[in-house]
Image: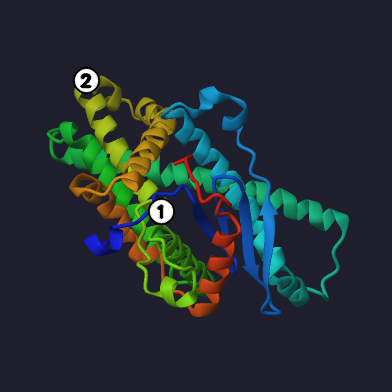
Amino acid sequence: MLSSKESQCCKKTSIGGQAVIEGIMMKGPNKTVLAVRNTSNEIILEDVPSVSLKDKYPILKLPIIRGVLGFIESMTVGYKTLMRSADLSGFTELEEEKDKDKPKSKSTELLMNVVMVIATILGVALALALFMYAPTKIFNFINSAAGGTLDVFRGLIEGVMKITLFVAYVLLVSMTKDIKRVFMYHGAEHKTIFCYEKGEELNVENVRKQSRFHPRCGTSFMFLMIAVSIIISTLITLIFPAVTKITALWIAIKILLVPLFCGLGYELIKFCGRHDNLLTKIVAAPGLWVQRITTKEPDDAMIEVAIQSILAVIPENQEDDRW
């Protein structure tokens, strides 16, 4: 967790980013940039189209709604920049080089696109099974064995199981070499943002000494979403206990409530990003702990990429009033 000294920042900013393959996508108040180091050791900067529906429809800026929209848009842009970073870094070319002797036809490319769509659908189905269906079925089994005495704790117990599954998944993927490098870039992103927030000159030495744990991280956001789901699920259990008795109905209700969890989680992480007190430190603590897994200490080359990415999105007038 951040010490009081580490968390004292000179400015609050909406600037945030996402680690990608050999680089960082950094989003500022006015523009979004993708910075990637390629196989020739060059840092490539590329603007990312980032027009938000909130700019066109003011109603989408309302609390809760803005969080849901922001999550959807960040997932969409994040996926596109991840794929683009593979091209810019030369990763795609390396993979194609391995398969250069394998002939590719239009039918093969079509098949690959179909496989990607199926993989995405299966990924969503797996997520629903792990975080919605499995906790409910496991709780029902435990509650049945306990004679139905755990009904009031359903929200809490299912929430703990979700957290356990989430942490286990993160630990598992962190063991792979490629993901470890992405997590190192994730650390570089956080360190660079901290350096900017503290008003220090953006150079490798200053960035290196910063903490890699930031309260506005997506990891913290996921934890806050789960925390909100525990509270709301517990309230529903207490007010409408009958709905939890029907497994299909209860799972459907949890799925329908995901946008609400997302919106409230966004408002909480927004609050934590703007305030530094005991309450916000307590709220942010679980996410900061898990960042010990999702962020790694970067090397200097990665820090250089992060610096270039943030310099490209800092407003010229240094004003940032969108957070």
The quadrant of the image that shows the N terminus is bottom left
Number of dots carrying numbers? 2
Number of residues whose C-alpha sits closer than 10 Å to that of mark 2, classed few (under 14), some (14–19) or many (20 or more):
few
Horizontal side, residue 19 vs residue 87: left or right: left
Mark drawn on residue 39? none
Residue sitting nearer the eye, 266 or 105 = 266
Residue located 52% across and 27% down the image: 60
In this rendering, the answer to whether 65 lies above or below 303 is above
Q: Going by the image, does 23 lie left or right of 261?
A: right
Q: Residue at x 63, y 59 (%)?
A: 34
> What residue type is disc 1 on?
Cys
Alpha-carbon span between mark 1 and mark 2: 33 Å
To which residue does mark 1 refer? 217
Give the residue pinned by disc 2.
239
Residue 89 found in image quarter: bottom right
Residue 305 to residue 311: above or below: below
Q: Which of the two residues, 164 or 23, is positioned nearer the viewer here?
A: 23
Q: Could you say whether the residue bearing mark 1 is in a helix, strand or loop?
A: loop
